[in-house]
Amino acid sequence: MQKRQEFKHLQQKDRDRIHDLYLFGHSQKGIAEVLGVSPGTISRELKRYDKRTWRYSATRAQEDAELKRLHSKRPGMKIAENHALRQQVIQELKKLRSPDEIAGRMKKEGVSPRVGKNAIYKWLYSEDGKAYCRYLCTKRTKPRGRRYLEARVLIPDRKSHRTRPDSPGLIHTEGDLFVSPQKSGSTVCGLLVVEKESKLYSGALISNKSAAFIVPAMRRATRAVSADTCTLDNGIENICHRNFDVDTYFCDPGTPTQKPDVEGSIGLVRRWFLPKGTDLSTVSNETYQSQLHLLNHKYRRSLGYRSAYEDALERGIIKRVPRVSLQMAIAFR
């Protein structure tokens, strides 16, 4: 793949050379080679001025460029120039709120002035806000492409997710495992169960994928969210699904996207706390519970910028919010 040429603004000296070279009949490609820029840069520069009305002038082109740049919005300008708004955004970021949560809650509460999530991201990716990118779940200064999970192995004695009943009042969940890297030699894996409507999380870290650990952990996780059904993938660890004490259904082979809530939720846990490559044997189950507790407290756009706990309490899925320290999850980061 050809490397993209680095972008740079044309300066007065560059426009002077364009003026002279173009006046003496040099092609746009030849001018671009002399200045070390893309031919498209020269083409756009000349197209701004109609040759039928007047000839290209370096002086006027530079004046126009400076005027345009003077009135342009630099990234994150609204946050950078409003001290109170900037401090509010920083305070929420330090509580591990995402830009979407911050912007959505501002809108819900009628805060003025307020900003959208795109403006917060622009400010974070600018020089002024780059120091606060460490509070993002990815800790990155620019977004990255999406990744897809590999296909799973088909297991026997299974019911398709298409046969799952849609009766009103039933509580549907999705479940899955995420594991330690093979090179670590650890068999510890994380179980995550997600209630589909409230996005309420439950789960545990377990020693290995054997039925002796999977079955009791799955029973506790589904009971914590009052699950009536649970949709799983075709991993061989689910071969004892009849002992999970919940009505289980399965995705099609190699189609994890048919349980998007738990796939996305594992991605959220990975981005915030346990990135790929983390040896889960170095993480205590208490720490993992505090991480799930913190995520259940996060404001979600799909819930009208309420937390999973708020929605679950309203729907009667849970009777009270469990007492778990958030400080352990925050300190882990």
Image (spheres, rainbow, N blue to C red):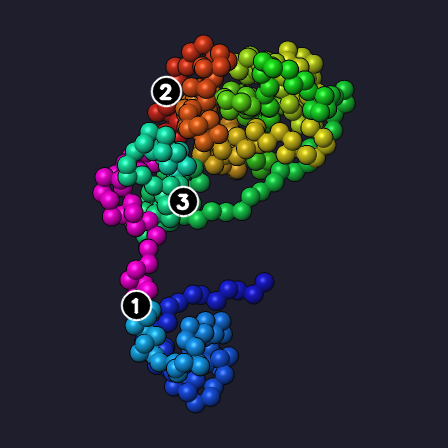
313, above or below 35, in the image: above
Q: How far separated are the C-alphas under marks 1 and 2?
A: 54 Å
Residue 186, can we see it?
no
Residue 32: horizontal and vertical position, in percent?
Answer: 46, 77
Tell me if residue 80 is in the magenta stretch: yes
Identify the residue at image location x=51%, y=27%.
281
Q: Which residue in the structure is indicated by mark 1?
A: 66
**Chain-order first, disc 3 or disc 2:** 3
- Residue lying furthest bottom: 24
For the N terminus, the image quarter is bottom right
Q: Which residue is mark 3?
A: 118
Please state the horizontal and vertical placement of residue 167, each as a whole percent of the image. 64, 15
Mark with earlier residue (1, 2)? 1
**Residue receiving disc 2:** 325
Horizontally, residue 296 falls left or right of residue 112, namely right
- Which residue type carries mark 1? Glu
| Badge 3: residue crowd in 10 Å (few <14, some 14–19, many ≥20) | few
Which segment is the magenta one? 66-95
Q: What residue is at 47 percent from the left and 17 percent from the top?
A: 312
How far across and how far down the image is residue 255, in percent? Answer: 68, 34
Between 264 and 302, the one nearer to me in the picture: 302
Residue 148: x %, y % from top left: 61, 40
Please give the label number shown on residue 8: none
Question: Can residue 161 be seen at all in this image of the molecule?
Answer: yes
